[in-house]
Amino acid sequence: MKQELKSGTHTACGATESNAVYRRVIWRIMPIIFASYIVAIVDRINVGFAKLQMGADIGLSATAFGFGAGVFFIAYCCLEVPSNLCLTKFGARVWIPRIMLTWGLVTAATMFVRTPFQFYIARALLGVAEAGFYPGMIFYLSQWFPDERRAKAFALLSIAGPTGAVIAGPLSGWILTHLNGVAGVHGWQWLFLLQGVPAIAMSVVFFIFMPASPAHASWLSIAERQLLADAVESSSVSQKTNGSLAKVIVNRKVWLMGLILASCYLGFYSVAFWVPTLVHSAGVAGLQNVGFLAAIPFLGAALAAVPVGSFADRTGSHRTVIVLGIVIAVGGLLIASVDAHSVFLTVSGLTLAASSFQGVVPVLLTVSGRGFNGKSAAAAFALINTLGSIGSFLGPYLMGLGQDLAGSSSAALRIITVLVLLIALAATRLPQSTGHLRRDGPVRS
């Protein structure tokens, strides 16, 4: 009896010590990662706000805008895997700042576009510059957190996305309204110039303050670094890690995950790039008012990510969370498409859809990383995100095409809703996460 008590006390002390170390890690690395991803999202979706002015200036139709917004992802996905492999070679401390520096320069240079073709080139170059950033961050976090802690860590990263979108709305609306014509420069040009600078600044911050891995974290003791390394290694071994890069490429699970992620991105980026236009079309006047209302769906998404990720980790019911989340998101898209002139239905539906998609993605990425580590993990995350980026391209492009052909964004939104639902049926093929190990034992579901 005494031995059992002693063992239980030792386990509790170990868990307390471990939790304290992970809290230190979160507070030390997550603020910089969070800020970096906020900047990425602002620079990725600010084009949706710039369109409200630049469309007339450069002769940009709805289809041309949709293609330009989506072509970012074609260039992005073509270089996802090579970029993540470079990250494993050069280290996160060097490669991630390189990504941020180049996309910041491209964003600022977008102020000089004068034709739709130049707009396409600028968006493609932004995709080339930013390629590998998100899966690189996912891989970077997987070096710090074992499997049972990753859904929450990935959720903390993911909420930076909608947080960036929340910031982008009012900020972009203010720039377009108050800086238009200053020094003879259009508001949309000021938008690209001013929003490109933070990425350049964050590249310097990341390089100076972020360690390449836990082994290089001088602010941790040797024992604490070993604790992190042992936890990640134990997690990988327990999942029968396969280190073959070739087997990653032919792995059916990787392609299934990529297909499901594509459905989520198809729906989410239909919202992300078009929410300013949808809100404006619903009858909202004033670019600053549009900016504030367009931030609401992303505020909901920011609030949903961590609770959903924590619930999935706690219960182990990852498949249920993924399937149910996508079904709810589809319902949100349908609500938004019911009446294009209702501000309430449009904003409410888009908020429900964005929140659900945002909650699903980190849970999906948690399941995706199981069974891989090292180069194979980097390649798996990148390949899954590459496949997902196909949906990121199709979403904004189909929205623009549908608006030009049907004269209404509601019809395009309904078509996208059906596509999301059909693709997402693949999620029912995922294994349920029963028996998944937590810090304090197995989870039953």
Image (tube, grey):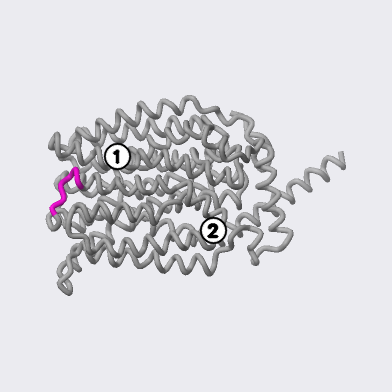
Instruction: Find out whether residue 397 is within the magenta segment.
Output: no
Q: CA distance from mark 2 to mark 1?
A: 30 Å
Question: Could you say where residue 326 lies in the image, as x and y percent from the top left?
Answer: 39, 33
| Residue hosting label 2 | 92
Residue position for label 1: 395
The structure residue drawn at horizontal position 70% and vertical position 58%, both measured from the top left corner, is 224
Going by the image, does 413 lie left or right of 141?
left
> Which of the numbered marks, if any, corresponds to residue 311?
none
* Type of amino acid at the residue the image marks with label 2: Ala
Residue 62 image position (x, y, % from top left): 17, 45
Number of numbered labels in the structure image: 2
Specify whether 103 is left or right of 152.
Answer: left
The residue lying furthest to the bottom in this view is 183
Of the residues under marks 2 and 1, which one precedes in the sequence?
2
Q: Which residues are magenta?
A: 59-64
Q: Quadrant of residue 214?
A: bottom right
Callout 2 secondary element: helix
At label 1, the amino acid type is: Gly
Q: Residue drawn 48% across and 68% down? A: 205
Q: Is residue 324 above or below residue 110?
A: above
Could you tell me residue 403's position as x and y percent? Answer: 17, 39
Frontmost residue, 66 versus 157: 66
Where residue 209 sits: x, y (%)?
Answer: 54, 67
**Secondary structure category for the residue under label 1:** helix
Residue at the image point whose x is 29% and y is 39% from the top: 395
How many other residues sit within 10 Å of disc 1, few (<14), some (14-19) or many (≥20)?
many
Q: Inspect this view and state whether residue 222 appears.
A: yes
The quadrant in which the C terminus is found is top right
Q: Residues within 10 Å of mark 2 (few under 14, many from 20)?
A: many
Tell me, yes or no, if residue 166 can be seen here.
Answer: no
